[in-house]
């Protein structure tokens, strides 16, 4: 496509220096500004960066047609805890006569300290005023026996059972949206139900919010992932889900919000865990270079299938006929995976993803793809037994930003006709970037990698894949898994809640082209917030080398560690280094596998072979269910684990650091502080040959 006539300025990128500042640091910014028009842009326009309350201006030089310049606004922003979302605007004072005035802005999330710089504020129900019943977990945080408090953030929530009971809290920032993490009863025969609850602001009724149990309530006593069922009976788990709504107008900071059970709100009970309020930006406008899916026949909000239109637009982009796919604001129904047509089909299912495609939306709250299909993997419309009928199959160099992908999953399932599929899957290839994408009710949020044997001639592991600003909620298995030799890839500034397996994982599995070369390496999970995995770990690494887990916040795991290094799942060996640095772990660890195995907040488990090159440093571990750091029995060794500048406080049912009886290896401690552990500070079970040295 040709460039627009006249000058046309756009922000290509925004960067900060330093990239991950400490609290109190002076942060400066640089902005890449491009003139995508066919005439030069004169010097003198203002490129502006707004970070919190700081407004920084820079003078833009002349930009020839089609060229890009770097602008460094004067001054700096003082980093505050939690970070900030920065907005950069070209021609901020509107002095340039541009052909398109709607594409001048760009955004950057700057994280400070630990966790993601999320745009919402979380309010715990138990921290507000309430007239219901406070639910609190038992000392062992028992899971799997219909234990609401164990599955609650902070291990506390509020139950409303009578008309007029409510939860009330005061907002600390402006908001025009709400998310409610809640539990209401299942339908008598299973399958869930919808019920309302009433929202008030400063005592005035705002609207009814619809809560649902259609994606919660799994039954059974087994800990096997595919063993649970949707049919009511006996013990239940995965009790919570979330509802969200735009409120139609903005409410200022200091608003007193109330969730109340009114006469028409007739669920037998409501358990309110937390509420999140966010000031959602207006829907973005279509970039000039993009082509809307409506040009291919998609119609928003009509409940009809839009897959053919979405697929046609993506295919056109892949073929070079258009420059970018635009998904406007609206609800778009998608019941088939977007992929590349493969006439050979390579067996039962198409396993060819899309490549060289850019897909942009108006914002994750505005441009939403959704699926209703059941069974989720109906014959004739699937491309792989575990990948489902929604989302995108990605093979190489794909950019997706500012959309939501909502599945229809309600179980992990034990055959291909039940489970909910994968939001984003495929080989991913080189330089794929996923930004500001919300995935919910999938079996797996994102699975990066395919077995070499799928289609050997298309083999290409994920390399330089990046995820940022991603929001993954309420899955039945993993959040994001870097598999099949993924390397040099990053998950950054993203949030995960209520995943049914590892929220984040590197699995250096052996199903690759060359087991000596295609080993997962140099991947990083940095500045993410992980909450409430209802099965498995917060973050896990299975094999590989030079992978890292840094600056994350992990809280409230149901039954497994906050962080685990392990050699189960048949990974390729650990080598090089594995870094666990500057993480905060709160109320993590738990008991699993018939409640016979107790896991620490950080657990190292060499089930089959050695785990080498491990450093744990600058980390805080608080209020662990069992041990703070645990060296587990296994067939492998754990030599020279370095634990430096680590604080462990409150190992409620275990030790600060524990080496189990069959653990082999040694740990070198430096500046390790352990307090308030039930079973001692640094302990070895009888018969253990593990050696601790240093402080």
Image (cartoon, grey):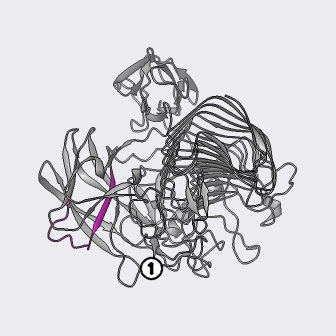
In front of the other: 113 or 88:
113
Image x and y of residue 498, in percent: 48, 58
Range drawn in magenta? 260-275
Does 571 sit left or right of 656 as displayed?
right
Judged left or right of residue 183, residue 288 is right
Question: Measured along the vertical axis of the image, is residue 150 above or below residue 5?
Answer: below
Residue nearest the viewer, comparing 68 with 214 = 214
Q: Residue at x 72, y 78 (%)?
A: 348
Residue drawn at point x = 11 percent, y = 51 percent? 203
Query: Residue 513's quadrant in the figure?
Result: bottom right
Please, which residue is most extreme toward the top here?
A: 74
Q: Is residue 64 visible?
A: no
| Residue 402 position within the rendered picture, expressed as x and y whole percent measured from the top left | 47, 49
Of residues 293 and 416, the one nearer the viewer is: 416
Q: Is residue 390 magenta?
A: no
Callout 1: 10 Å neighbours few (<14), some, many (20+)? Answer: few
- Rendering coords of residue 366 (x, y %): 38, 54
- Residue position for label 1: 234
**Res. 512 visible in picture:** yes
Quarter that holds the C terminus: top right
Q: Is residue 143 above or below residue 274?
A: below
Q: Specify the farthest residue to the bottom.
A: 189
Q: Quadrant of residue 684?
A: top right
> Which residue is more in the foreground, 58 or 243?
243
- Would residue 437 appear left or right of 300 to someone viewing this image? right
Q: Residue 633: x, y in percent?
A: 73, 54
């Amino acid at each position: 496509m040709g460039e627009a006539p006249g000058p046309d300025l756009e922000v290509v990128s925004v960067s900060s220096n330093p990239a991950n500042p400490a609290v109190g640091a002076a942060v400066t910014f640089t902005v890449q500004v491009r003139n995508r028009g066919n005439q030069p842009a004169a010097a003198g326009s203002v490129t502006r960066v707004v970070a919190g309350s700081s407004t920084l201006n820079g003078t833009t030089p002349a930009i020839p047609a089609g060229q890009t310049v770097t602008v460094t606004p004067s001054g700096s922003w003082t980093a505050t805890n939690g970070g900030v979302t920065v907005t950069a605007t070209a021609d901020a004072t509107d002095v340039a006569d541009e052909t398109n005035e709607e594409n001048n802005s760009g955004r950057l999330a700057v994280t400070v300290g630990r966790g993601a710089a999320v745009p919402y504020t979380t309010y715990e129900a138990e921290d507000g005023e309430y007239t219901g019943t406070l639910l609190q977990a038992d000392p062992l945080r028992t899971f799997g026996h219909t234990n609401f408090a164990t599955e609650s953030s902070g291990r506390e929530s509020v139950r409303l059972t009578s008309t007029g009971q409510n939860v009330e809290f005061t907002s600390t920032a402006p908001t025009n949206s709400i998310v409610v993490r809640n539990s209401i009863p299942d339908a008598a025969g299973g399958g869930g139900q919808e019920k309302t609850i009433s929202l008030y602001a400063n005592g005035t009724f705002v609207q009814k919010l619809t809560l649902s149990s259609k994606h919660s309530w799994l039954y059974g006593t087994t800990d096997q992932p595919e063993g649970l069922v949707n049919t009511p009976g006996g013990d239940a788990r995965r009790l919570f889900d979330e509802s969200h709504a735009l409120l139609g107008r903005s409410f200022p900071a200091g608003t007193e919000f109330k969730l109340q059970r009114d006469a028409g709100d007739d669920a037998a009970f409501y358990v309110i865990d937390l509420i999140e309020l966010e000031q959602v930006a207006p829907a973005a406008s279509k970039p000039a270079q993009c082509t809307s899916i409506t040009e291919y026949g998609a119609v928003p909000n009509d409940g009809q299938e839009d897959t053919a239109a979405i697929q046609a637009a993506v295919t056109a982009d892949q073929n070079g006929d258009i420059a970018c796919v635009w998904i406007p604001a609206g609800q778009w129904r998608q019941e088939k995976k977007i992929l590349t047509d493969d006439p050979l089909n390579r067996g039962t299912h198409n396993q060819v993803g899309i490549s060289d495609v850019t897909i942009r939306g108006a914002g994750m709250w505005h441009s939403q793809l959704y699926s209703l299909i059941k069974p989720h993997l109906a014959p004739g419309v699937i491309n792989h037994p575990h990948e489902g009928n929604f989302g995108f199959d990605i093979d190489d160099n794909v950019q997706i930003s500012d959309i939501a992908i909502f599945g229809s999953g309600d179980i992990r399932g034990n055959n291909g006709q039940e489970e909910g599929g994968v939001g984003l899957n495929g080989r991913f290839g080189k330089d794929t970037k996923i930004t500001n994408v919300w995935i919910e009710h999938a079996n797996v949020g994102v699975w990066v990698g395919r077995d070499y044997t799928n289609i050997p001639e298309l083999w290409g592991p994920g390399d330089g894949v990046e995820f940022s600003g991603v929001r993954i909620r309420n899955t039945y298995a993993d959040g994001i898994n870097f598999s099949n030799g993924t390397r040099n890839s990053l998950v950054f500034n993203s949030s995960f809640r209520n995943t049914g397996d590892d929220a984040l994982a590197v699995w250096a599995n052996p199903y690759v082209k060359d087991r000596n070369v295609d080993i997962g390496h140099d991947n990083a999970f940095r500045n993410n917030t992980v909450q409430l995995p209802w099965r498995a770990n917060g973050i896990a690494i299975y094999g590989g080398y030079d992978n890292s887990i840094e600056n994350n916040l992990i809280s409230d795991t149901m039954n497994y560690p906050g962080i685990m290094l392990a050699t189960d799942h048949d990974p390729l060996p650990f080598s090089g280094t594995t870094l666990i640095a500057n993480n905060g772990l709160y109320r993590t660890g738990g008991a699993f596998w018939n409640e016979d195995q107790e896991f620490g907040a950080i657990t190292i488990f060499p089930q089959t072979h050695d785990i080498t090159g491990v450093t744990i440093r600058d980390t805080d571990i608080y209020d662990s269910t069992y041990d703070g750091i645990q060296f587990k029995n296994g067939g492998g060794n754990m030599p020279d684990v370095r634990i430096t500048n680590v604080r462990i406080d409150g190992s409620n049912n275990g030790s600060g650091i524990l080496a189990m009886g069959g653990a082999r290896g040694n740990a070198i401690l430096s500046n390790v502080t352990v307090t308030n552990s039930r079973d001692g500070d640094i302990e070895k079970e009888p018969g253990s040959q593990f050696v601790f040295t240093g402080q």
